[in-house]
Image (cartoon, grey):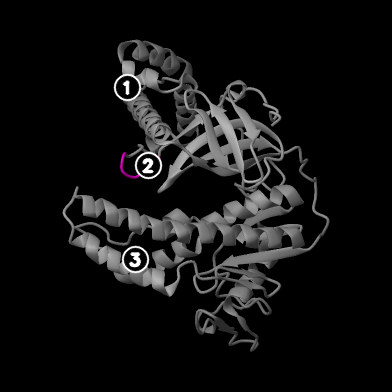
Amino acid sequence: MLTGRRYRLDLTADQAEYAERVGGICRAVWNTALEQRREYRRRDAWINYPQQAKELVEAKAEHGWLKDAPSHCLQQTLMDLDRACRMHGTFGVRWRSGRRWRPSFRFPDVKQIEVQRLGRRRGRVKLPKLGWVRFRWSRALGGTIRSATVSYNGRHWYVSFLVEDGIIAPERHASTATAGVDRGVAVAVATSAGRLYDREFTTHGEGKRYRRLQQKLARQKKGSVNRKRIIAALRAVKRREVNRRADFNAWVANRVTARYGLVALEALRTRNMTASARGTVAEPGRNVSQKSGLNRSILQKGWHRFELALANAARYTGTRIVKVPAAYTSLTCSRCRMIDPESRESQAVYRCRSCGYSENADVNAAKNIRNAVGHAVSACGDLGTGRSVKQEPAGTREELPLQPV
């Protein structure tokens, strides 16, 4: 199966400056090609990758700064754009903002990539035009390399290898047990077996520091050095929160998929659920502050990220993931099937007014999700026994065996 291996790079000052420049060039190529595609669509025409790749060669002859970036990186950017437009539509693909987008670029030609291990904690990789770059050998590669992606995340540069680990996905799970999983705002994950998984992703001190930094940011002049410094400090706090959430999701997904052969989830559209309720000037929204607080709680628990982590872990165990309709799962008694909003006494307590059944509200909802497996909807995104969630990107060509030290 295809999987990812991510390592922190130790770039020199010149290498870091060059990597940032290449990331900017790839962003410019993406935005220009996307605008070209949109102009074609407005005229009811279509332009695809081969034509844009040909025009890129002509543009490099006219604009010398495009030659600074490796050709394969620019071609891969156009391939990624072509794939995104086919999946989401030309007008559904986003621009890459200079302020919000984190620089990244991919090397798809494995013939130009060479990896060597230097010691217990160090390794190095040879990349086109970057040369030899040292990185922290935090884990074994465990397979053959298919591509390499260099990216920037706040303070450090990283290299991610797409690796074929040689593991064959099992056809089915060793267990036939079924579990329902409920995602909540009081408890991140609850299973129908009664297990509750939750943790705090931000400490009390980090929360206070983040609020103080936000207050300082409001008093800074836009474009000033102090404003950039405070923004960097805010991002550092958020980055720790994101890393903890990713670790938690992977940990819980591993436990759930190891125990159960079939896992049922609610078919939730998190992006629609966390949309703003502000409305328009003509029709302002209602209960905006309450909806804003709910949006923050949902995003903080990482509902969508947990779903992705569950699908990724299911590839190695053969667990099947299905999605069931989410309507009334939190208001229905899992014993007598009576639907009564008054039975949900609080965020944590469910006490049926019909049969007297009492249970944790999230566990009761998880049992309803498990019982609804027979009425499951099409599990779009169910990658447990199908294709890999870490698909080989378009444009990768051959495998590269590890080079001996």
Which callout, 1 or 3, points to the residue nearer the camera?
A: 3
Q: Residue at x 40, y 73 (%)?
A: 205
Identify the mark at residue 210; answer none if there is no mark. 3
Label 1 belongs to which residue?
A: 43
In terms of secondary structure, where does tag 2 sit? loop
Q: Residues within 10 Å of mark 2 (few under 14, many from 20)?
A: some
Q: In the rendered image of this protein, does residue 170 appear above or below residue 147?
A: below
| In magenta stretch: residue 26 | no
Quadrant (top left, top right, bottom left, bottom right) of the N terminus:
top right
Q: Position of residue 366 (x, y in %)?
A: 63, 70
Amino acid identity at mark 1: Arg
Q: Earlier in the sequence, mark 1 or mark 3?
A: 1
Q: In the rendered image of this protein, does residue 100 appear above or below residue 400?
A: below
Most common SS among magenta residues: loop
In-front residue for pair 120/104: 120
Q: How many marks?
A: 3
Distance Cα–Cα, label 3 vs label 2: 22 Å
Amino acid identity at mark 3: Tyr
Label 2 belongs to which residue?
A: 101
Q: Residue at x 68, y 79 (%)?
A: 335
Which callout, 2 or 1, points to the residue nearer the camera?
A: 2
Q: Is residue 45 visible?
A: no
Q: Magenta span covers which residues?
A: 98-102
